[in-house]
Image (tube, helix red, strand yellow):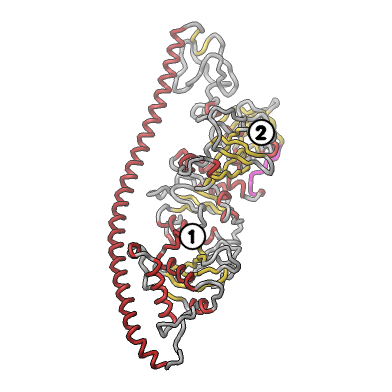
Amino acid sequence: MVSTPDGARDLAALLLRADRETAVAVVSTPSGSDKPLIDAAALARYGRGRVPVYVLKTGPASFALADAMPEYTQVYGGAGRIYAPDLSWVTDWSRSRLFLAYDEQSGQRATDGLIGEVARLLPREDQPVAAQPFRGTVKMLIPPSRALIESEGEDSVLATISPEDSVPALEVSIGQLVAQGQHVEGGYDQDTGYLDVSAGVYPPERALDGVMAGDVVLVRVQAMTPEELVVEPYPRVAVRIPKGRVTPNPFDSLDDLFWIGAVARARVESTADGLALSMDDVDDDEPVRTPPSLLPGGPPWLEEADTAAWEGADYVAGQPTGGAGSEPQSPGSAPSPDTAPGVANGDAVGGGGTVPSPLAVGGVVEGDARGRRIIELERALASARESMSRLADRLDREREQTEQLRRELSLTRQLHREAVNEAAQLTERLQHSMAQHRNASRRLAQRRPERDGTRGGAGGGTESPRGAQALFLEPEDQLRHEIYLAWAQLTPPQEKGRWPLPTDYVVGSGFLDSLKALEGVDHERVLRVVVEVLTGRVKDIPARQLHRLRLNNHSGQVRTREDGAIAFRVAVQVNTPSARRLHFWRLPDGRVELINVAVHDDIDI
C-alpha cells in the first residue's frame, strides 16, 4: 500500500530504474477510498510471485507519483497499469496501457485486462503449459472471460477457454474469441482444465489480407492523447491517427468523443508500408467491411452494435437456458420473461442445441393469437423493467456526480478566496521589493563618484559579464541588479503584480563563471530566460522546452540532490549549433537556484 508522497516518489524511482528486471503492477484507489475496484489480490496471485503489485491511494500520494513520472504514464482515480521492465513506455506511453475502473463491473474488466498484460509479460516457464492435443466444440459462453468446450469422441471431456490464459496479448473477451458451436483445437492442460488455442490465432498479415484503400473498417480505441488517437484494426496492430484526421473541428476533445476500448469506424487511406487510417470522412450509411475473426470459424472480433451478438448466447446469469439434463417445461406454461426473454418460434435454446417444436413454444400452439399476445406483453414488460432499472442506476450516478460537482464548486470558491489573498500578499511583497531596489540604486548612485575617485581616472572598476561598466563591487550584486532591470523592462506595468520578481532566489557558485565563459549568445537573452524562470512564466512558453534534467541521455531517472532539489533545463537557444541551455535547481521550498548556462549536450551540473 502506497499512501504517502515519499512512498510514491520511491515507487516512481523503482519504476524508472534502468536495471529493473520484472514487470510492476500499480493499482490506484478511487478518490476518497482506501480499497481499489481492481482485484489487486487476484493480480498478485496470477503474477506467481514474479510481478509485485502496488496499491496507490489517490490523493497526495498519487499527485506525487504523477509529478515524478513521465507525461501520460501516471495512474490514479481507480485505474491500473502494468509497467514493463524495458522502459520503452517512458517515451512511448501506449506501451503501458491504462485500464480504467469506475464501478464493480468495470473493475472486473480492468482486472481481466491487467491479468492478460501480466500473462503476456511473464516468462513462458512461469505460465501454464498445455500438453495434450484437443479438438472440440464450444458448448457455452460464460462472458466476459470463459467458454466451455466439449471434446470430440466417445469419452467426452469438458475444457475451459480463458482469453487471459490462452491469448492474453490480444486483450479480448471470450465472445470476441469464440462462438457457440464453433470447432476449436489446441493444447489441453489436465492439471488446470484449460485449453490453449493461441497457436490457431490468425497472424495480423493474414487477418488483414484483402483490406484495400477506401474500405471502411471497425477499429478498437487503444490509447489517446490530446493530439492523436491510437486504434487497432486487429489486436496488437496499432495505427496512429492525428487529431486532424479524426475530427475536422479543432475545438473537439478526443476524450469527449472516444474512450479506451470504444469501437469506431475508420477509412483505409493506404496499405503501403502498413495501414494508414482516417476517421473524419466516414459516413454513417457507408458499408463496413466485416472484421476478421481471431480463430478459424470464429465470430468477428469487433461488433459495432451497442450490445454484441455473443452477449445473449445461451446463458442467463451465467447458467444455460436448457439442453441436456434441463427440466422440460410443463404444457401450457409460458416462458418467464425474467429467465428466458426473447424466446420465439424456431429459436434454438440450451447448451445442448435443443430446438423447440415449430408448432409449440411453452405450450402455445401456433395460431393462438391470444397466447402469442401474452408472450409479447410479458417480453415488453421484462424490457420495460430492464429499462427502468437502467434509468434508476443512471439517476443514482447523476446524483453522485451532482454532489461531487457541488463539493468541487465549494473547494473552487475556497481556492479563489485564498488566491485573492495570496495575490494581495504578492503585490505587497512586490512593492516592498521595488522600494528596496530603488533605495539600493540611490545609495549606489551617491557612492559612485567617491568610488570612481578612489580607483583613479584610468577607467578602473569591475565589469559585468557582458563587458559593460559594473555598478557593484560584487559580481553577484551586479547580476542581481541586471536581472531586476531586465524584469522591469520586460514586464509591462499591469503585469508586474501578476509576475513579481522574487528576491530570495539563489545564485549557484558556478553560475557567474559560466556567464563569463559564455560565447555566441547575447547576454540580454540569458537575462530574459532567467527572468522567465524566476517569475514562473517559463512553463507557459513552449519554445523554452522546460523539462526535468535526467541523469544521462539514456536514463529515465530524474536528477535530484540530497536536500530534495530537482534539476530542470530550459532552452536559451534552439535550432542553433551548440545551442545553450540554462540549468537550475527547484528547491523543496519552491525557490530557484541558478546552476549554469551550457551547451545542449553538456548535462554535467
Q: Is residue 529 above or below residue 412?
A: below
Question: Where 531 falls versus 221 (above or below)?
Answer: below
Disc 1 marks a residue whose amino acid type is Ala
User: What range of the chain is rendered magenta?
Assistant: 126-132
Q: Is residue 311 left or right of residue 380?
A: right
Left or right side of 396 for 158: right
Instruction: For label 2, count other residues whose C-alpha is less than 10 Å away and answer few (under 14), some (14-19) or many (20+).
Output: many
Placement of 198 over or under 532, stated as above or below? above
Residue 387, how many percent across, how many down?
Answer: 40, 27
Query: Separation of disc 1 and disc 2 at Cα?
Result: 43 Å
Residue drawn where x is 42% and y is 75% of the image: 482
- Image: 121 above or below 300: below
Can you tell which mark lies on residue 295?
A: 2
**Residue 128 colored magenta?**
yes
Tag 1 residue: 68
Residue at disc 1, secondary structure: helix
